[in-house]
Amino acid sequence: EVQLVESGGGLVKPGASLKLSCVASGFTFSDYWMSWVRQTPGKTMEWIGDIKYDGSYTNYAPSLKNRFTISRDNAKSTLYLQMSNVRSEDTATYYCTPSTLAPFDYWGQGVMVTVSS
Amino acid sequence: DIQMTQSPPSLSASLGDKVTITCQASQNINKYIAWYQQKPGKAPGLLIHYTSTLVSGIPSRFSGSGSGRDYSFSISNVESEDIASYYCLQYDNSPWTFGGGTKLELK
């Protein structure tokens, strides 16, 4: 059974940095592209970016490219999202999701990030 | 970026009804559209990809169609377990973009 467990969220102040993690199991993590997707409190869904199965290439939504960095550790089956200089509009639930047989075909439970002073 | 205009934002249906949701892309997306279901308090789940390919285990009352810029998603014989929000996603051109969502409620 595929499992994706995100962690690292919480309440952070504007301008701070935060690193989210996603531990994957139930599939061969190192074989697949992985993405981060977020959902705002207003339920808008936004793709943040993705990373190639071997970590050699990343791709980001242009509006987030300068502040967010995606990385992975295949030995630990773990995906990361480094967020810097966070803003109130980054308040959202963050999901990690692989694309195995189809785009975003499995989802974790998500982790909430609240940016507020 | 490709804009995905999803309609309607909300939909009220009776059990057994057929409902249809549409997504219009700002340009041709070559059938690279997927549909997700999200129940309250849960993560989204993939139902359909490449316009009409049903994910294994998804009931056949769910279907998708379309081409070019215009796509639709339908549920025939709505059941109570279908009460959820639905989102389209285009994955033809990066950045991948979602529609605004449709909330399906019981009449």
Image (cartoon, helix red, strand yellow):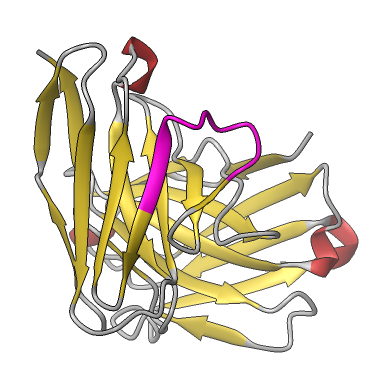
Asked whether, in this view, residue A20 is left or right of residue A9, the answer is right
Q: Position of residue A64 (x, y in %)?
A: 34, 78
User: Is residue A117 visible to the viewer in this orientation of the structure?
Assistant: no
Query: What residue do we see at 37% from left, 26% from top?
Result: B39
Residue A65 occupies which quadrant of the picture? bottom left
Query: What residue do we see at 29% from left, 68% from top?
Result: A15
Q: From the viewer's perspective, is residue A102 above or below residue B82? A: below
Asked whether, in this view, residue A96 is left or right of residue A9, the answer is right
Q: Residue furthest right?
A: A75
Q: From the viewer's perspective, is residue B5 above or below residue B101? A: below
In depth, the one of A16 and A65 nearer the eye is A65
A24 is within the stretch colored magenta: no
Q: Position of residue A20 (x, y in %)?
A: 55, 55
User: In the image, which residues are magenta?
Assistant: B55-64
Residue A99 occupies which quadrant of the picture? bottom right
Q: Predominant secondary structure in magenta?
A: loop
Q: Position of residue B82 (x, y in %)?
A: 35, 22
Q: Position of residue B107 (x, y in %)?
A: 9, 13
Q: From the viewer's perspective, is residue B42 above or below residue A33? A: above
Query: What residue do we see at 38% from left, 15% from top?
Result: B81
Query: What residue do we see at 74% from left, 39% from top?
Result: A2
In depth, the one of B5 and A9 nearer the eye is B5
